[in-house]
Amino acid sequence: MLTQNLGYPRIGGQRQLKKASEQYWAGKIGLRELLQIAQTIKQENWQTQLNAGIDLIPCNDFSLYDQTLDMSLLLDVIPQRYAPLLANVAENGVTDLYFAMARGYQKEGLDITAMEMTKWLDTNYHYIVPEFTADQEFHIFQENLFSDYTNAKQLLGEKAKPVLVGPISYLLLGKEKEPGFDRIDLIKKLVPVYVAIINRLKGLGAKWIQLDEPCLALDLSKKEKEAFDFAYRRMANQVSGVNLLVATYFDALLDNTQLAVNLPVSALHIDLVRAPEQLDEVLALLPATLKLSLGVVDGRNVWRNDYSTSLNLINKAVKKLGTDRVIIAPSCSLLHSPIDLDGETALNAEIKNWMAFAKQKLNEVRELKQIAEGNDALLQANKIAIEGRRASQKVHKQAVKDRVVSITEADTTRISAFPIRQQIQHDRFSLPSFPTTTIGSFPQTDDIRQLRAKFKKGELTVEQYEAAIEQATIDVIRWQEAIGFDVLVHGEFERNDMVEYFGEQLDGFLFTQNGWVQSYGSRCVKPPVIYGDVSRPKDMTVRWSQFAAAQTDKPMKGMLTGPVTILQWSFVRDDQPRDVTTNQIALAIHDEVLALEAAGIGIVQIDEAAIREGLPLRKAKRSHYLDWAVKAFRITASGVQDRTQIHTHMCYSEFNDIIEHIAAMDADVITIETSRSQMELLHAFAHFEYPNEIGPGVYDIHSPRVPSIEEMVALLTKAAELLPAQNLWVNPDCGLKTRKWPETKEALENMVAAAKQAREQIQIEA
Ligand code: GLN
Ligand code: ZN
């Protein structure tokens, strides 16, 4: 029986790669130093995996920015706009071209935009989207892959396994940059280059090559399935003497099972954490030539593996295939997992004992093999930890569970239907048409960040800290009044992050010191961990909302994060369904909404920035998800009086296929990100005849650029052509936390002026 790993985090245990890349971009260190730091991380990663007893160890899984971008450079898929940078490659190497593709290039009179970035399937990791043209050609361009393999081989010998994005997923995850062709048709030109790469790796000594084909777990068209078959048959005909391993993950193969098991390769990897139920069918169909890699250790979460559960799967496979056709592995690359639990010195010891990060997961893979080969002591030790978690009072709160079970229809429904609420709210707030507001946060200046840092370090007393936050809040309220906003916000100066702020106050959450995961390039996130039943010991935001409301006669919006967003941006319990955890969070947020209402806050915004992100990869699973996600939002928003106005906010989302569910959330007002798409996204709302009020963003907050009054009036005019003007609000795309003050002030002054013009120019039907 073999063990393998599919990929290892590359940021380094102390985020060395992040720091080094940022220093390199800032011109503070040279290329040689950056590459040296990268090399050290690679060597350490290989050594760690070797020490853990892994048999097939990935190389080329490391990347200075993103592995899909590495593929584009390897295959010479370099968009034409970077041509001016090619001249330097011979002299200075490829790194500056590479970073220009990732981040754009504004130097020496050149102004070249970056390539698009999007989420890697349903993870929070972002990859650089390959751009294809109709006459796209492929060649081997960048040679790093080969030197990386040679390096790895020196340390690992035959265990070194180069990893590539497979040819079909590489095409499908990219984009046509001009009309008139289908990128999947490029497969005929692409396969010969993969053949050349594989043969070169074989020539250097590679025994195994991993081809990641996550698209095998997606809904595929007939043509895409045929392309899979074509590509792998062609490769099999032209390479020999090297084992190809196709890796799938994040969902079941389902209708692609036949296709996947019949690919002419040496081994297939399947995700048995996300989809354990697929094992039976795969085993039934697997031809005798294929080895099966069992992804039993969760590569995307922080929990210790339940060996008994994994062992059942392993035993089943061994019984059918024999030990030498079974490989044990994590479910997917460990890129999505924090690096080393040993570094967490402040965690509660009991809870820490239930957890495993990347390094610990490698040991789990090896131990599972030892257990499958008869080591019973390891199994017993694991049972004790798992049982401890199952029974722990830290995890289980009966009152919380009972409350979730007793949620009724009434708990998810507002008292009156929207038209009645709308009338009551209009009478209460007497807002003008095209009312102006913002999404919540105002610029978090260095002063504010330092204030929080000092407070955390104990250098400021609570009184000093709160006085300073109060002052910032008062200032921003005075300013909003002065420029004429209709609905004010308090600015969120007391919050570091919209999920962390709530997680820190809710029971059932914990925070790590160093549990960083790469989000994109040098950007890392440190998601909170939900380990137990979630409850709300006391009010979370009332103090600040009440303080802010008392400073003004204008309506002050309360500001909360919704349950699905809190779930999506955390590591979640794996011992109960996600919807149960979401409902627990929803009840906690619901209680906070009621507390705000009782404190006199008339408008409450519940942000669901991430609702679209949670959508399952397979279409067939989407409606179930949307049902519980929408229900969770409705739990938070119900129970208030008709006169309380509930807002929600969503970041950039494609609404077309989910619009009925968005409408079912029944928020009185929804604000969305639309300015970059020139109101394109509103078509979904228009087509659906979305009945409630809506604030399409008119100011792109992802850029320091200040939009003009005319520009924003034009956007509002467009919006009013699509939706009833009396339902429209005027607001930016999203929160302003990452912006600087000068541009923010100018842009918002223009925005308020644009709303005034809209009131004069755009007809409102009675
Ligand atoms: N209220 C949050 C803010 O303004 C919303 C941020 C978001 O949608 N990502 O920062
Ligand atoms: Zn947003």
Image (cartoon, helix red, strand yellow):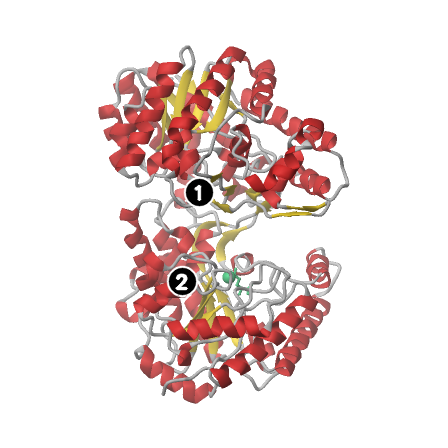
In the rendered view, tell whether residue 456 sits above or below residue 49.
Answer: below
- Can residue 514 be seen in the rendering of this structure? no
> Which residue is under mark 2?
586
Q: Furthest-right residue in view?
A: 28
> Which residue is under mark 1?
175
- On the image, which quarter does residue 122 sit in? top left
Label 2 and label 1: CA atoms lie apart by: 37 Å
Of labels 2 and 1, the one closer to you? 1
| Residue 129: x %, y % from top left | 49, 42
Question: Residue at position x 42%, y 35% from top?
Answer: 171
| Residue 135: x %, y % from top left | 45, 35
Image side of residue 637 versus residue 259, left or right: right
- Badge 1 crowding class, 10 Å Cα cut-off, few under 14, some 14 to 19, many 20 or more, is some
Image side of residue 119 versus residue 36, left or right: left
| Residue 438: x %, y % from top left | 55, 71
Element under disc 1: strand
Q: Between 730 and 163, which is closer to the camera in this rendering?
A: 730
Element under disc 2: helix
Of the residues shown, which amino acid type is indicated by label 1?
Lys
- On the image, which quarter does residue 178 sit in? top left
- On the image, which quarter does residue 455 sit in? bottom right
